[in-house]
Image (tube, rainbow, N blue to C red):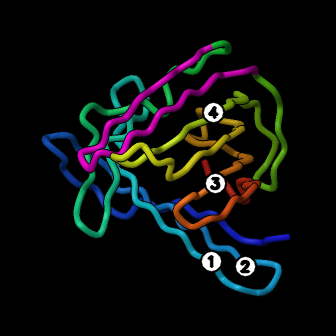
Amino acid sequence: SVKGTLRYDIVEETDVDGVTSLVLKWTLSLTTASGAPITLTEFGLIAQDESGSIWLIGMSTPEGYDILAEPVIIRRSPMEVGQVVTYTGNFASGKVSIGSYRVERVERVSVPAGSFVAFKVTESSTTKDWLGQTLLSDEFTSWVVPEVGRSVRSIWTVTYYTYGISLKLTAVLKTYTK
């Protein structure tokens, strides 16, 4: 068994090719059964349009920004049951991310932050390098509450081929202030 936390933080607002974007930091901190700590950090560049849809603009790396040739929608607004979104994201570095998500249904979900009516969303994606080698593959089930602006519960199964690790994580919203 592995215990850990997944944290999202908005680090800064920046301008990317004339688009106001937020740098979103994902930090996954784990402790393995043997007590070894693992921390994985990624930085995404996201933007929100006038409809409320959220777009991935690129990723931030130690070398600078790895910008997508075209932004990729990662959450369409308004959400509707049956909605399916597929995407292919071509990064400047040559990496390619291919995925899709589907809004399955509306259901009530209870988490430590409260009880919410949420859209149940299933998602899968694969990221490959410029040689076609798979770097990462994942599957998500999320309960998204548009009024909260995020998922309140997520189950994430991910394989980081670069690190040789596979994880299944469950995240819940612990606190929420309107």
Question: In the rendering, at what x and y percent does residue 35 appear?
Answer: 77, 87
- Of labels 2 and 1, earlier in sequence is 2
Q: Which mark is residue 12?
A: none
Do residues under tags 2 and 4 come within 8 Å of each other at their CB atoms? Answer: no
Q: Secondary structure at mark 1?
A: strand
Q: What residue does disc 4 label?
A: 123
Disc 1 crowd rating (10 Å Cα; few below 14, some 14-19, many 20+) is few
Q: Is residue 98 above or below residue 174?
A: above
Say which amino acid is labelled 1: Ile
What is the quadrant of residue 79 in the picture?
top right
Q: Which mark is residue 31?
A: 2
- Of labels 2 and 3, earlier in sequence is 2
Question: In the rendering, at what x and y percent does residue 66 appear?
Answer: 27, 52
Question: In the rendering, at what x and y percent does residue 26 appear?
Answer: 51, 61
Say which amino acid is labelled 2: Thr
- Of labels 4 and 1, earlier in sequence is 1
Q: Magenta stretch? A: 83-105
Mark nearer the viewer, 2 or 3: 3
Say which amino acid is labelled 4: Glu
Mark nearer the viewer, 1 or 3: 3
Q: What residue does disc 3 label?
A: 159
Q: Is residue 86 above or below residue 127?
A: above
Residue situated in front as seen by the camera: 11 or 116: 11
Do residues under tags 2 and 1 come within 8 Å of each other at their CB atoms? Answer: yes
Magenta portion: prevailing SS class: strand
Mark nearer the viewer, 3 or 4: 3
- Identify the residue shown where x is 82% and y is 38%: 109
Do residues under tags 1 and 3 come within 8 Å of each other at their CB atoms? Answer: no
Q: Secondary structure at mark 2?
A: strand
